[in-house]
Amino acid sequence: MTNFIIEHQCPQCGAPAELEETDRLFRCGFCRTASYLSAPSFFRYVLPHNAPQDKELVYFPYWRFKGMLFSCLPGQIRNRFVDLSQQAISSDHFPFSLGFRSQTQKLRFATSDIHGRFLKPELPKSGLIDALNDRFNANLPKPILHQAQVGETISLLYAPFYVTEKVIDAILNEPVDGGSTEETEKLLQEAQSPNWPIQFLATLCPHCGWDLNGERDALILYCQNCQSVWWPKQGRFERLPTVYEKTSLQSPVFLPFWRIQADITELPLSSYADLIRTANLPRVAQPGDEERPFYFWCPAFKVHPKRFLAIAGHLTAAQPRDGLETGLPQGDMHHVNLPLQEAVEALKLILTEFVRPRKRIDDILSALQIKARRFLLAYLPFEEGPHELVRADMRLAISKSTLNHAHNL
Ligand SMILES: [Zn+2]
Ligand SMILES: [Zn+2]
């Protein structure tokens, strides 16, 4: 698994800095200014070149995908972790993928200070997903009922080349196998300038003006002063609704979950009583359970694909509801690094974890549609053991090493 390094300059004082790919909250080591990085749809990076000074560079685009890929088959779900790059312009005249280059080189953001001509991607982001599915489906038994990508990072990486009488790889300064100057000239007719600025948001609480806090890869930031939670939306911070479960534990660790209410077709699943029937839970519906809404509970943190769905299915079947308070808990909070959108993409998969009998969900999975309607971020307290975080009441344990290793996912 790779998590590459990006060379960068502090937008405030210009001091050099290095970021990890997943870093969002950047605090300058020199001027201490903090800012939050965002890009309109995805980040674009360039690989550094070793070309002679007089050469005009041509940047060829590669999509880069890193994330979990789930495939639902009758009676089972296959998951795999995928980390790969592939051409964003289908061409026999450029290397098919980046190979290991992006792991050994320090990248830079593709911003206007990078000189060169950028070839325009032909394959859209959606085409990348189709290509990924095609590639991995070849080895799967059929039929495939549903597929989803969860928690993925998608970015565009530009690799440098230049043209002499041959097409030269500007990293290795060697001719490209099968490179064609005519084809490159043709592609250059659609070249772009690197006009993709990175946005830096000031990390001040929009409500009270205090500094917002968070982990370096956090997708949301907190204000400790007014106990509010914020996430970036279209270039500014918006308030995110949160609840937490009260606890009598001495030093709880709070894990974040997306609690999502959704419209589901093909399956009666709008109340807790529906859940008892649909999941065949060993309990009898109580008065009020028909009115009590059903919620999906999905981890808002990255965790190994094997555990991710199991935890979501477990929590969803448990439907925590007691002692939920508005606001932020006191104590250790695990950071949020799985976006809401990714949780929404996982909802269909989560159904397969608890709908019984399993065949029932297999039969309707392709046709079934889920539309998320309402959400909030909910913090649930876990008791910290030597190796695990435990919810005895739900018979759920999450290994601490699984959580720590998830940093690179
Ligand atoms: Zn600085
Ligand atoms: Zn505040």
Image (cartoon, rainbow, N blue to C red):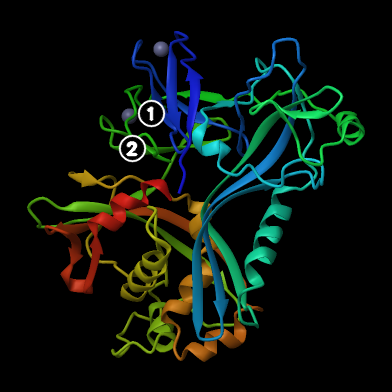
Residue 23 appears in the figure: yes
Say which amino acid is labelled 2.
Answer: Ser
Labels in figure, total: 2
From the Cβ of disc 2, is ligand 2 less than 8 Å away? yes
- Give the residue displayed 31% in from the left and 74% down from the top: 318
Which labelled disc corresponds to residue 153? Answer: none
Question: For mark 1, what is the residue?
Answer: 207
Residue sitting nearer the eye, 310 or 285: 310
- In the rendered image, residue 161, in percent from the top left (x then y), is placed at 73, 28
Residue neighbourhood size for the residue with mark 1, other residues' Cα within 10 Å, grouped as few (<14), some (14–19), many (≥20)? few
Which secondary structure, mark 2?
strand
From the Cβ of disc 1, is ligand 2 less than 8 Å away? yes
- Give the residue displayed 25% in from the left and 63% down from the top: 398
Left or right of 174, for residue 82: left
Residue sitting nearer the eye, 321 or 258: 258
Residue 370 appears in the figure: no
Looking at the rendering, the quadrant in which ligand 1 lies is top left
Left or right of 140, for residue 243: left
Say which amino acid is labelled 1.
Answer: His
- Which residue lies most toward the left here? 250
- In the rendered image, residue 268, in percent from the top left (x then y), is placed at 52, 83
Are dots 1 and 2 in contact, CB under 8 Å? yes
Which comes sooner in the sequence, label 1 or label 2?
A: 1
Which secondary structure, mark 1?
loop
| Residue 285 location, quadrant | bottom left
- Give the residue displayed 56% in from the left and 30% down from the top: 235
Question: For mark 2, what is the residue?
Answer: 228
In the depicted structure, whether residue 191 falls above or below residue 156: above
In the depicted structure, whether residue 183 falls above or below residue 317: above
- Give the residue displayed 48% in from the left and 88% down from the top: 358
Residue sitting nearer the eye, 96 or 123: 96
